[in-house]
Image: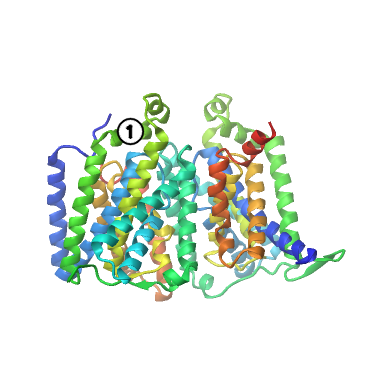
Amino acid sequence: MTRVAAGPAAPMLRATLAFAVVASVATWALGVEYALAQAAFVFTYAIAGLGVVLVVGQCGQVSLGQGALLALGAYAETLLALRGMPALLSIPAAVALGAAGGWVASLPARRLGGLYFAMSTLAFALIVEEALVRWESLTHGAAGVAVPPLAFGAVAAHSAFAQAAVGFGALALAGFACRRWVASRLGRAWRAVREDEVAAAASGIDIAAAKCSAFVLGGALSGFAGALHAHWIGYVSPEQFGLMLSFELLMLAFIGGARRLSGALWGALVVVALPQAIAVARDALPGDAGSASGVETLLFGAAIVAVILLRPQGLAR
Amino acid sequence: MSGLALVQVLSSGIAVGCVYGVVALSFVLIYKATGTISFMQGELLMLGAFAVLALHRGADWPLAAAVPGGVAAMVGFGAAVERTVLRRAIGQPHLTALLLTFGLGLMIRGGVATVPAATHSLYRLPFPFAGESWCIGEVVVAAEHVVVIVATAVLALLLTLFFRRTRAGVALRACSENAQVAALMGVSVAGMHTLAWALGAGLAAIAGLLLAPVTFIHPNMGLVALKAFPAAVLGGITSLPGALAGGLFLGVAEALAGLLLPEGVKDVVPYVLLMIALLLFPDGFAAGLRAAGR
């Protein structure tokens, strides 16, 4: 079996160093405040990316519903925080709701293969999105809800520095948990299911349980990421968590290299930076401003296609 | 609630279901022949409708020439995209092809949205029957719905003839059943992949034309294709007649839900049905019915 994420420390060290270089260049180019705010987003995207890596990279299933799982976490955290629940209680609740969502989304297809998982998670995501729009008494519908800052007792994470620090701590926690899972019996079962379901079943692995656990843990990470992300952007609405986000997360895992945990961080860096690079590129192009959103969509699609054609195995290899 | 109103709701449900069914057909055709999950069928549908619109409005072709011209252009487009881009995703995991088609779909949607004329107003194709209604006995039905249903029936007949009577159709079916054996029998598998994408794009364009009388033509009309995924899965994912039947079923179910259930439930009915169907009949409705009949 190929060596996976929980490898020796040397690549991790190299990745940390490279990341430090990227961070210092970003700080120099963009200013400290802006770079820290972007770093906070990179960390939450990376946590959500870890969820995708577990489901897609480790267990080999396709999920089109990760965006909706983030939405569950974000809305749970927002609504509980608005009702005055302390963050140390509301964040675990958001994580639990994300995990429950992952379980429900995977339930219909747990005995079937890849395409059916994609379809049942897609259906789940569209149902969640519609429910968030329609359940106006709770979610304020399509108008969205303002999110209070993340607060632990009297200490609130107002500044970009505090948000980046909390995000980094959360990512370190999530990454540590993922390393343990991936190196455990559970992780070996996921990889066996990914490589060959029949052989895995013949070796005594409960395939349905393995897939289900990947979706539950992936959902928990998504709920965690969604809860923090809601605080960073300060406002949640159903459209932020639509199909586009699910595909962004898949792309994140693909770019970073879905089979490695560190891929989540690299992919997150690209996915956060890409829209800004596209905005710069669009300003450089001649033409009228009226069609700006169309050009951005076009360039985003072109970036996806280019990455897949040039590096079908992901950027990390 | 009167029987006449019910007939009208049903006719509109069947007409919308026909569109779902044809999109699902194009999706299943591509999935069976090439193993690629296409997430760009909605964009192909939208592009097809715009191609006909551009030929009619922009180039002043009569509608009778613009419709076949636009569909033929989309067939060519599908073949060209397969030859240049999609071919490289063959043999890669599901995820690669899924992301690739999604990226291409974004490019198409973004490309259409950059044309100012496409986004500034909503268009209709001026079909001669647009806005009329016909009386059959006491029942009044919209002409658009009847035309859509008849056109879908004709399309299904033509496809059946193609798959059963022509050499290319039989070769395509053989390729879907077992590509290796088909290759040994002298079928060009790569050529069949191109044919599948050409047909898939053409069918999506036809679905766009079927949808155009019911809704307007606009850059986001491709969202209707999201309903084609449940239709394809309900039909058993690898069955062409099943996909069409699944689409019809969803269209009718949606129309009835719009009539009987509260606002907003209608839009999620296909997805709820999909989740239930996956739980109860993991192999599709057809297999479920066979099992029940035994």
In this rendering, is residue A66 above or below A135?
above
**As rendered, which of A116 and A202 lies closer to the eye?**
A202
* Residue in view at x 45 percent, y 55 percent: A125
Q: Secondary structure at mark 1?
A: helix
Is B202 displayed left or right of A264 in the figure? right
Label 1 is placed on what type of residue? Ala
Residue B245 on image: x %, y %: 67, 47
Label 1, on which residue?
Answer: A189
Q: Quadrant of residue B186?
A: top right
Quadrant showing the N terminus of chain A: top left
**As rendered, which of B25 and A217 lies closer to the eye?**
A217
Residue B259 on image: x %, y %: 67, 65
Q: Residues within 10 Å of mark 1 (few under 14, many from 20)?
A: many
* Residue projecting furthest to the right: B137
Residue B198 visible in rendering: no
Chain for numbered disc 1 = A
Residue A61 on image: x %, y %: 40, 41
Q: How many marks?
A: 1
Is A306 displayed left or right of A156 in the figure? right
Residue B48 on image: x %, y %: 58, 58
Quadrant showing the C terminus of chain A: top left
**As rendered, which of B218 and A261 lies closer to the eye?**
A261
